[in-house]
């Protein structure tokens, strides 16, 4: 893997924002999260409108493209379905790289309604610094930049490179191969035959394969002290709090 890449501009600022809007809202009784009304506007199109004021292009990964007819967003469905949010990330990055060169993409989720350009700028600085360090050392540059949260990281409100497309496809292929082998073993032992689907790989597994940069939690909290920029809607209680999420 090469150490030098053409990703966005010299500051690491993405020109494209992508919204994953395919969540089923199982803990919300199956409601489509992107259609949740906020101040008279559906959550998905609302976020597309907000992001369109800060990015040149908007991509929405959705099964309901008609919802975005009134925005300037381009829509797509999962190109390789079955892998959850990573399928959405793959579809977004695949569409973003149509220009034929590396691009950086700001990834958002439709159920995370808050946005602050300062967070994009902070992660862009982290990406640019990590890329420059890799260039000096002759090592592979980062393919993403994410905020740390304790021992974990935040996969949304993060920067991704379109060079991750190949890594994602390799990860999907490995997961499919493992599922086929598991099904074969189960069939031979007559244990659980037909019950084993393809396990969804995680973002953690992705970054075990691909280099990424991380911004320390204390740095991110200078922008969002209460971590409200990462508030998302998964449960009825969180839905009830939706009107109070201000990004502080």
Image: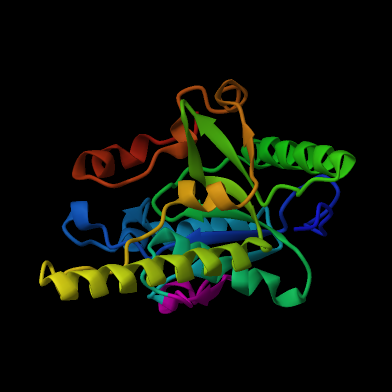
* Of 92 and 84, the residue lying toward us: 84
Residue at the location (39% across, 71% down)? 176
Residue at the location (80% across, 57% down)? 2
Residue 62 quadrant: bottom left
Note whether residue 194 is visible. no
The residue most toward the right is 136
Residue at the location (22% across, 68% down)? 196
For residue 55, side relative to residue 170 (left or right) = right
- Residue 31 x/y as whole percent: 23, 61
Reply yes or no: does residue 71 show up in magenta. Answer: yes
Residue at the location (78% across, 42% down)? 128
* Of 43 and 129, the residue lying toward us: 129
- Residue 103 x/y as whole percent: 73, 62
On screen, residue 75 above or below 118: below
Q: How is the image coloured?
A: rainbow
Segment colored magenta = 65-80
Residue 164 quadrant: bottom right
- Residue 181 x/y as whole percent: 32, 71
Reply yes or no: does residue 92 show up in magenta. Answer: no
């Amino acid at each position: 893997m090469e150490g030098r890449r053409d990703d966005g501009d010299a500051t690491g600022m993405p020109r494209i924002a992508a919204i994953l809007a395919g969540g089923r809202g199982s803990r919300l009784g199956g409601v489509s999260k992107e259609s949740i009304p906020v101040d008279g506007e559906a959550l998905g199109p609302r976020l597309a409108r907000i992001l369109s004021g800060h990015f040149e292009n908007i991509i929405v990964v959705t099964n309901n493209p008609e919802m975005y007819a009134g925005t300037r967003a381009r829509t797509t469905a999962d190109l390789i379905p079955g892998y959850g949010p990573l399928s959405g990330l793959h579809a977004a990055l695949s569409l973003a790289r149509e220009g034929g060169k590396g691009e950086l993409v700001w990834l958002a989720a439709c159920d995370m309604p808050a946005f602050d350009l300062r967070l994009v700028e902070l992660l862009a600085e982290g990406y640019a610094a990590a890329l420059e360090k890799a260039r000096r050392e002759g090592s592979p540059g980062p393919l993403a930049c994410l905020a740390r949260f304790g021992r974990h990281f935040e996969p949304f409100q993060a920067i991704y490179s379109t060079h991750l497309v190949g890594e994602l496809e390799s990860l999907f292929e490995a997961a499919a191969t493992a599922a086929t082998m598991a099904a074969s073993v189960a069939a031979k032992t007559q244990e659980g035959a037909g019950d084993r689907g393809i396990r969804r790989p995680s973002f953690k597994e992705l970054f075990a394969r691909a280099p990424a940069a991380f911004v320390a939690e204390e740095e991110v909290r200078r922008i969002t002290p209460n971590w409200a920029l990462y508030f998302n809607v998964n449960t009825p209680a969180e839905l009830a709090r939706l009107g109070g999420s201000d990004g502080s």
